Image: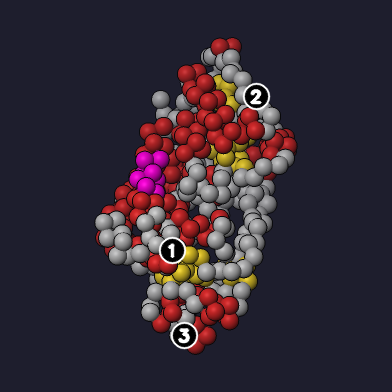
Amino acid sequence: MRGKIGTILILSLLVLAVASCGCAENKGQQAVPNSSAELQGSGTVQITDMLGRQLTVTEEISSVVATSPPSTILVYMLAPEKLAGWNFKNNFTRPFMDENYSGLPVIGGWFGTQTGNYETIITMHPDIVIEGYTTDGEINEAIERRQESFGSIPVVAIDDSITFVTQSDPTIKYVGKLLGCEDQAEKLIEFRSSILNEINSTVKNIPEDEKVHVYYAEGPKGLMTDPSGSQHSQVIDICGGINVADCQLTPGNGMTQVSIEQVMDWNPEVIITSNPQFYSTVYSDSLWASVDAVQNKRVYLAPQNPFCWIDRPQGPHLIIGTVWTAKMLYPDLFTDMDLPQLTREFYSEFFHYDLTDEELNAILSPAAEA
């Protein structure tokens, strides 16, 4: 029953909370079944979040605020009518999103260097606040501090893993049950599994000396990057590329500064970027002229709307970005992977927007910005 959390879901939520990365068990929490009989008829039920915390929430959840982009985008993909606001402005003046969703207020949140405003969110009176956690440590204390600041609004902790592309099934299932949209959650899991299985089965057979050497160009000059193992360059690792960036991994926001001399020394065969400004100048910039990827016209700008497909924001939407990345790196190996058709399907099912042919072309051929 969409929008309602019935008593029958309680034990299921508990099992998922314990199963997800062993969070409850690993952090010394014991997730105990809740007795909700006393709450029947009161309009509330008890649940257990993914950290094993027991919460009383309204039975009919119709308004949700999430405090970071991955969780916000997941709510949008699963139950857009329940989303109360965005963490970031992004490019919502552009098409490819229904105005009912693009017009939602920007409420901020806690991610990167951003610090949210409790009062702004509290005045919106959401039924729950979803708080993602990504690292070990004093997670419970941090969540409890957030709960204290939000007062009577339940803060539901979910595993907001930075490797959302490859390790997200428990979270997707949990949020699907929480918001009463299990079927939509299963669709996303099936789509994701199908894509990853096809990519994995192909790239595992590529000899190491035949793998494509890739540079991820960030910033307007392309001279910031993230090495292998970073959350920000994960699509390269997933798709079997060799990330050439031999530099330190900058925790958190990433974007390690490098020099053009380093890039020339690495001499990547392919450059992918999420920055339209860099893309608009790279072919005319003499500094980049000797790089193989530039000489061979293999610099690719990732699709941008309604969210960048490969990085910033992180989130479950990056799964469609792995399709794009695989096609850019190994076009001859992924001829059976129909990017236009998969894009149409993904936008219709998970971005809740049916693309015209013109819009599809605009997404897959994003314009550079001077």
Quadrant for the N terminus in the image: top left
In the rendered structure, find residue 292 and report the number of the disc placed on it: none
Report if residue 45 is visible in the image: yes
Whichever of labels 3 and 1 marks the residue nearer the N terminus, that label is 1
Q: Main secondary structure of the magenta part?
A: helix
Q: SS class of the residue under badge 2?
A: loop
Residue under label 2 = 30
Q: How crowded is mark 1: few (under 14 residues within 10 Å), some or many (20 or more)?
A: few
Report if residue 273 is visible in the image: no
In the rendered structure, find residue 289 and report the number of the disc placed on it: 3
Q: What residue type is labelled 1?
A: Glu
From this view, report whether residue 251 is shown above or below residue 183: below
Q: Residue at x 42, y 33 (%)?
A: 181
Tell me residue 108's x, y (percent): 61, 51
Q: Could you tell whether 14 is left or right of 148 in the image? A: left
Q: How crowded is mark 3: few (under 14 residues within 10 Å), some or many (20 or more)?
A: some
Whichever of labels 2 and 3 marks the residue nearer the N terminus, that label is 2
Whichever of labels 2 and 1 marks the residue nearer the N terminus, that label is 2
User: In the image, which residues are magenta?
Assistant: 189-197
Residue under label 1 = 208
Q: Mark 2 or mark 1, which is nearer to you?
A: 1
Q: Which residue is drawn at 62% across and 42% down?
A: 133
Seen from the viewer's position, the closer of residues 158 and 16 is: 16
Q: Which residue is drawn at 52% across and 53% down?
A: 314
